Image: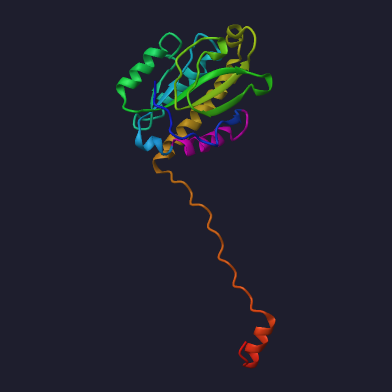
Amino acid sequence: MFKQNVTRSADLPYKVDHTSVESAKFLSERLLYTVHQPSRERQVVIVCIGTDRSTGDALGPLVGSKLSGRLQASQAVVYGTLDAPVHAVNLKDTIQEIETTYHNPYVIAVDACLGQLASVGMVTLGDGPLKPGAGVNKVLPEVGHIHITGIVNVGGFMEYFVLQNTRLSVVMKMADCIADALTESLTQAATFTLPEPASLPEPLPQKQPLVNRINNLLGFKS
């Protein structure tokens, strides 16, 4: 399994509604602060988990397909597309392949999940590994140093049926949001520098006591 981060970000998890006009921008900015340093020192690998056989579970492969035509290998290597999905059957082998191919890679995991009704449509950026299959009671290997999940539908009952009957329109728009944010953040990461902390204003000179000021004007020593 991948070596985990030594430090964890206090700013995560971060959630954004994919229907917000600037959702991709907000997610990209938070991603940039998270990945700019490791992306310069380590190979970034994005693992998009899911299958095109289920509408709701196709979020990961959709994101992977969008990214594979945008990112260069120097920016990130993408696993999991519509043509070659990463799913429950081959996830373990995919993780082993990544560990064998790349030295200490920085892994970003992407997957769909189910949640509460009020949270449907939310995209979450979280610290630490993703636990795929948890929403449908499957035990699968954890993956990722950070993860991005999209809540595509309501969980709690008949999970497989719910995923298969999720609206494709919602999944497509969430995939656009995630892919746009990852593309923008990884493109900017090479030249990004953290802004300097705001400097404190110079202290104002202290005024002399009134008596001393009068004595100085009159030529007397105070």
Name, please, the residue furthest toward the bottom: 219
Give the x, y percent position of residue 198: 53, 54
134 in magenta: no
Residue at x-position 41% and y-position 39%: 37
Q: Quadrant of the C terminus?
A: bottom right
Q: Quadrant of the N terminus?
A: top left
Question: Seen in the image, is 217 located left or right of residue 142?
Answer: right
Number of dots carrying numbers: 0
Give the x, y percent position of residue 76: 38, 29
Return the residue nearer the eye: 45 or 206: 206
Question: Seen in the image, is 10 located left or right of residue 156?
Answer: left
Q: Is residue 18 visible?
A: yes
Q: Main secondary structure of the magenta part?
A: helix
Give the x, y percent position of residue 219: 62, 93
Give the x, y percent position of residue 123: 57, 26
Magenta extent: 19-35
Which corner quadrant of the image does residue 218 belong to? Answer: bottom right
